[in-house]
Image: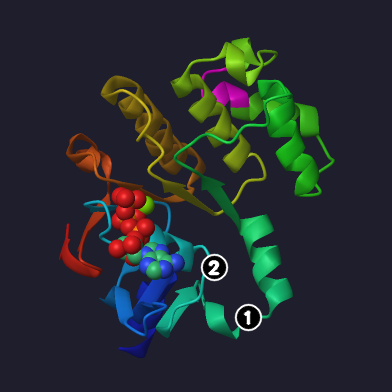
Amino acid sequence: MEKIRGDRVKEYMLRTKNVERKFEMPDGDVFYALKNININIPKGKLTILRGKSGSGKTTLMNLLGALDTPSDGEIYFSDSELTKLSEEEIVALRREKIGFVFQSVALIPIMSAYENVEYALRLAGINEKRDERVKECLKMVGLLGRMNHMPQEMSGGEQQRVAIARAIAHKPDLIFADEPTAELDSNTGLQVVKIFKELVEKEGVTIVMTTHDVGLMSVGDVVYELEDGEIISEK
Ligand SMILES: Nc1ncnc2c1ncn2[C@@H]1O[C@H](COP(=O)(O)OP(=O)(O)OP(=O)(O)O)[C@@H](O)[C@H]1O
Ligand SMILES: [Mg+2]
């Protein structure tokens, strides 16, 4: 019995136990942005966190990505409890194991697509076969032919794809994407999500993505729905 449970746990990249995030307001009121969150993020799958604006998606993602700390409860990254890790361990975890993609693409405007991706590898301290990896990542997002373009010479969807190439370059186990399609039209948004799907299937990456676009739900292997800071459904 114990063994079965242990094996199951190994299938999850992240697990939360009764996670809570409250904010104390200047007037003394306490606001619960997240309550009683118990979720399991499976390895090698695409998990979607959906919910209306203000439901708590970004707050939850920031906790899962160790950018913020829960007010109560526990978050396990594989076998490590995040709050028990030192600041150095957290920094290393984020640098080596995690990639982030944000809603507004934050490419460096004075660098080409190629240089943006290469810079991420430099920051991660990866020097070996850098050129090869940059090209491989740009190819995965279908932009090898645009590698010398500057951000302002690319469409929004192309820029977001460069941001994805940049996030995956150092081969993270886990990618967080907070509303990566919010600023794209629905067709381009779907393309971006298809790239995520491919990364999951071909590279075995684990992806957690937030969205309020109902049209994208079907691509998620797991979909958690948030409302007023609570999980109201799991599919
Ligand atoms: N630092 C903070 N202090 C106080 N309240 C906060 C803070 N950060 C978030 N909140 C509140 O927590 C709730 C959840 O916010 P969150 O950003 O997680 O929502 P969201 O689901 O990501 O929304 P959106 O779809 O608009 O991005 C909101 O009501 C927000 O106002
Ligand atoms: Mg948000």
| Residue 218 versus residue 13 in the image, above or below | above
The relative height of residue 175 versus residue 35 in the rendered view (above or below) is above
Q: How many marks?
A: 2
Q: Which mark is residue 45?
A: none
Relative placement, left or right, of 113 versus 3 is: right
Q: Which residue is mark 2?
A: 66
Q: Nearer the viewer, residue 49 or 203?
A: 49
Residue 52, percent from left and from top: 21, 52
Task: Residue at 80% x, 42% y: name it.
Answer: 122
36 drawn magenta: no
Circles 1 and 2: CB distance less than 8 Å? yes
Residue 175 drawn above or below residue 9: above
Please identify the residue farthest to the right as the structure is shown. 127
Q: Determine if the C-beta at disc 1 is less than 8 A from ligand 1.
A: no
State the quadrant of the N terminus. Answer: bottom left
Q: Residue furthest front?
A: 27
Label at residue 85: 1
The question of residue 139 being in magenta is answered with yes
Within-10-Å neighbours for mark 2: few <14, some 14–19, many 20+: some
Q: Which residues are magenta?
A: 138-143
Image quadrant in which you'd find residue 82: bottom right
